[in-house]
Image (spheres, rainbow, N blue to C red):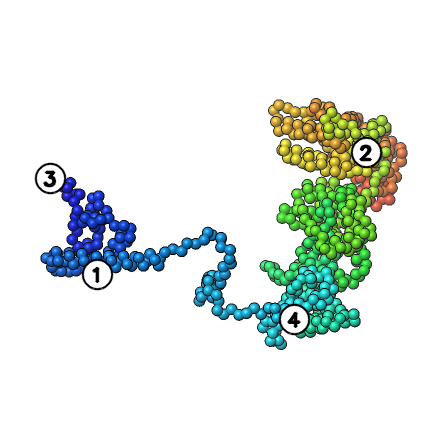
């Protein structure tokens, strides 16, 4: 055959003879334009429905048994007869399929649903019973084993409803799981019996208590007394008797144990909750001296260290703006047997052997705590609290001047802020009554009641000027400052210089109205004190602060860091604090920061620029000291209001310094005026004179001398002459 015949054959219908491998319903496999074998035989295209019927008939034909080869040859001999027979059979099957499809269309028609969430009804589904594997699901079927609710309109008519469960106690079959008080007469009575008990609101419609009925055990005595009152109506007495009998049966053993513990002053760990009544004051030496707290709640807990009872207790604290409550967590570790109640690390105030005197002491301390609200300049001598990197408390010794300022502590310290809770309803009621009697304080705040004084915290927070640390200070170690009224008089300076320094210092503290062209600029007073070491530069600033009775905040290079932005941040914070405290700022050895700028050191230039800009808007008093005045940047000269040069000390100046230090010595001086005159010829500065006298006093005390003699000073000078760099006249004197 030629190419045309091949092409013609490619588009002509192909008749597929059914075999074992090729069932009769197989569709056309050729690449002709026809879609199915039926179209190749000249049939019309079927619809989607007829295609589905063809697929169904194909499945039926696949289910028939395959014919043998012999049958196939017989079938081929009678092909015409079988073709006509299969054709009529196919028509019958098509009619049947059409009827079936019609039924499927009628029964399988999809229900049209409303949009999601649009039906204004409630649909209930129910939890199915668990299968053998413990699994369950949600179903539409209503459970068949559901019983009617036990609490209904009928049960609401009873005064008290007791919910019972099987008891684990061998002496009882049943025990109360909970009690529901429904009687209005009983609720009114319990409102007085359980007054101020935390977590109990007797005005509720359903007043429910769960075992072991702690409120009733803690107020059992009150319940018994109230029930014996003669002014009660019959209904109230009747209902109180019902409740009394129920509780007597349920917690009678606990009541006996509680009374026994109180009588003997001991308690077991299991029954600790009995003696610790919520809403009542407890005392504990928690993080300091003995302090009172109001118990909020107790809870038995455990961790890797064992079992313990956790007490959540409230104290009264100050948050920087207002007073409020702060909750502490105090744990009582598990112990074996019984233990004295007063031997616990926290116990009820009522068990303290000297309760009245302790309350009086706590109220007195609380009044001091209240008076320290705001910021105050005080003296301190004792232990204070700081914190390590993990937040653990560390005790350190502090001796010197401090600033009590909780608000600044919260804003500027790196340590955690204590956020207070608001007063509760009972607090507001007490404070309101106290306000009607005593009014408000100078800041317009409510005055604390004696009860809140008793609950006041034993520590307050602030800043140590000597250590330059934010600390927690104990109230009992805070004292008023003993001022050195002669400090400025003892300052060895010409009278005109002393008068000038006092003049601008006093006027600045009183509030000078002098201002720059730009508002808020140049309001401060900056004084530069220059001269050799030990001539009184630092002492001048200290004497001025002592004379004006204001804090002196000393600042050195190590306090501000090294980076420009670190310096700016720290300097800004310090200047804000100094302004708040109305303090004097002493910038010691200021040439470190104010050294003349150079083109090769950009970081140094940034630091100097920061100081120039900051000093321009500083509004307080600042003393700057240096012994290298020539190295200071020229831009600072115009920002300095007073510049004082301190020359080397003269003989008369040294004589005055020797006398001043001898007059303040702890040991009586035995040095004559002639000996002082001789010592004044030594070229020593004020700091050296102080150190020599201090060492001589220690030597005199070591030799148990009642007076400080010149021989002790000579011994110290003999040692001093061997020091490198000792004055030449000192060697000559010795």
Percent x, y of residue 651: 84, 28
Q: Is residue 385 above or below residue 692?
A: below
Question: In the displayed structure, does residue 718 sit left or right of residue 300?
Answer: right
Which one is closest to the eye, mark 4 or mark 3?
4
Residue corresponding to mark 3 = 2
Q: Check disc 1 and report the residue beneath it.
A: 64
Q: Position of residue 575 (x, y in %)?
A: 71, 35
Q: CA separation, marks 2 and 4?
A: 76 Å
- The spot of residue 565 in percent (x, y) is 63, 33
Task: Give the camera-side residue of 456 and 731.
Answer: 456
What's the distance in space between the residues labelled 3 and 1, CA to CA?
42 Å
Task: Specify whether residue 56 is in view.
Answer: yes
- Give the answer, above or below, for where 634 lies relative to 550: above
What's the residue at 32%, 58% (across, down)?
Answer: 104
Name the secondary structure under disc 4.
loop
Label 2 sits on residue? 510
The residue where tag 4 is placed is 158
Quick one: SS at disc 1? loop
Q: Report, in whole angstroms, how far the alpha carbon at label 2 lies from the one at label 1.
A: 117 Å
C-alpha span from label 4 to label 3? 110 Å
Residue mark closest to the camera, 2 vs 1: 1
Q: Position of residue 197 (x, y in %)?
A: 71, 61
Q: 258 or 107: which is nearer to us?
A: 107
Image point 72% across, 45% down: which residue? 320
* Sooner in the amino-acid sequence: mark 1 or mark 4: 1
Quadrant where the N terminus lies? top left
- Disc on the earlier residue, 2 or 1: 1
Image point 75% across, 67% down: which residue?
A: 222
């Amino acid at each position: 055959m030629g190419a045309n015949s091949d092409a013609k054959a490619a588009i002509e219908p192909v008749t597929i003879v059914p075999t074992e491998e090729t069932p009769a319903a197989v569709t056309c496999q050729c690449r002709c334009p026809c879609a199915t074998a039926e179209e190749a035989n000249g049939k019309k295209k079927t619809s989607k429905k007829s295609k589905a019927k063809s697929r169904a008939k194909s499945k039926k034909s696949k289910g028939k048994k395959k014919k043998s080869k012999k049958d196939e040859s017989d079938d081929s001999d009678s092909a015409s007869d079988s073709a006509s027979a299969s054709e009529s059979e196919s028509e019958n099957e098509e009619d049947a399929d059409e009827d079936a499809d019609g039924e499927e269309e009628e029964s399988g028609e999809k229900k049209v649903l409303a949009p999601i969430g649009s039906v204004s009804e409630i649909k209930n589904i129910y939890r199915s019973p668990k299968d053998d594997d413990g699994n369950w699901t949600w179903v539409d079927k209503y459970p068949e084993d559901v019983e009617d609710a036990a609490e209904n309109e009928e049960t609401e008519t009873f005064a008290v409803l007791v919910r019972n469960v099987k008891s684990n106690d061998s002496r009882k079959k049943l025990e109360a799981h909970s009690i529901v008080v429904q009687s209005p007469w009983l609720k009114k009575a319990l409102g007085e019996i359980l007054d101020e008990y935390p977590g109990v609101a007797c005005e509720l419609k359903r007043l429910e208590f769960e075992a072991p009925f702690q409120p009733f055990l803690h107020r059992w005595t009150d319940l018994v007394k109230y029930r014996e009152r003669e002014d009660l109506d019959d209904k109230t007495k009747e209902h109180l008797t019902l409740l009394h009998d129920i509780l007597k049966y349920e917690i009678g053993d606990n009541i006996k144990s509680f009374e026994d513990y109180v009588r003997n002053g001991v308690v077991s760990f299991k029954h600790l909750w009995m003696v610790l009544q919520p809403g009542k004051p407890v005392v504990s030496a928690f993080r300091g001296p003995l302090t009172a707290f109001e118990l909020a709640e107790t809870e038995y807990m455990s961790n890797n260290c064992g079992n313990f009872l956790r007490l959540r207790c409230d104290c009264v604290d100050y948050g920087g703006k207002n007073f409020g409550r702060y909750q502490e967590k105090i744990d009582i570790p598990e112990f074996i047997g019984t233990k004295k109640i007063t031997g616990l690390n926290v116990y009820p105030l009522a068990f303290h052997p000297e309760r009245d005197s302790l309350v009086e002491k706590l109220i007195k301390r609380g009044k001091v705590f209240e008076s320290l609200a705001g910021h105050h300049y005080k003296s301190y001598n004792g232990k204070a609290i700081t914190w390590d990197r993990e937040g653990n408390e560390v005790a350190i010794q502090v001796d010197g001047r401090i600033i009590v300022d909780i608000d600044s502590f919260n804003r500027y310290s790196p340590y955690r802020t204590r956020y207070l809770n608001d007063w509760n309803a009972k607090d507001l009621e007490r404070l309101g009554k106290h306000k009607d009697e005593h009014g408000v304080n100078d800041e317009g705040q409510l005055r604390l009641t004696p009860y809140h004084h008793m609950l006041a915290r034993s520590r307050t927070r602030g800043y140590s000027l000597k250590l330059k640390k934010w600390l927690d200070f104990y109230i009992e170690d805070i004292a008023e400052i003993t001022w050195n009224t002669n400090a400025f008089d003892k300052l060895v300076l010409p009278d005109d210089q002393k008068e000038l320094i006092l003049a601008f210092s006093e006027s600045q503290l009183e509030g000078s109205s002098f201002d720059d062209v730009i508002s808020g600029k140049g309001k401060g007073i900056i004084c530069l004190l220059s001269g050799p070491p030990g001539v009184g530069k630092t002492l001048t600033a200290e004497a001025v602060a002592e004379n004006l009775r204001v804090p002196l905040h000393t600042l050195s290079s190590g306090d501000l860091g090294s980076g420009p932005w670190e310096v700016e941040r720290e300097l800004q914070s310090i200047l804000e604090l100094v302004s708040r405290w109305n303090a004097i700022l002493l910038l010691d050895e200021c040439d470190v920061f104010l050294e003349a700028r150079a083109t090769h050191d950009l970081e140094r230039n940034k630091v100097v620029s920061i100081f120039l800009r900051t000093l321009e808007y500083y509004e307080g008093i600042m003393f700057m000291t240096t012994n290298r005045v020539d190295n200071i940047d020229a831009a600072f000269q115009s920002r300095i209001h007073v510049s004082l040069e301190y020359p080397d000390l003269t003989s008369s100046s040294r004589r005055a310094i020797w006398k001043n230090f001898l007059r303040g010595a702890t040991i009586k001086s035995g040095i004559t005026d002639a000996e002082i005159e001789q010592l004044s010829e030594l070229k020593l500065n004020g700091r050296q004179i102080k150190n020599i006298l201090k060492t001589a006093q220690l030597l005199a005390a070591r030799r148990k001398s009642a007076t400080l003699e010149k021989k002790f000073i000579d011994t110290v000078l003999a040692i001093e002459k061997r020091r490198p760099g000792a004055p030449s006249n000192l060697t000559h004197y010795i």
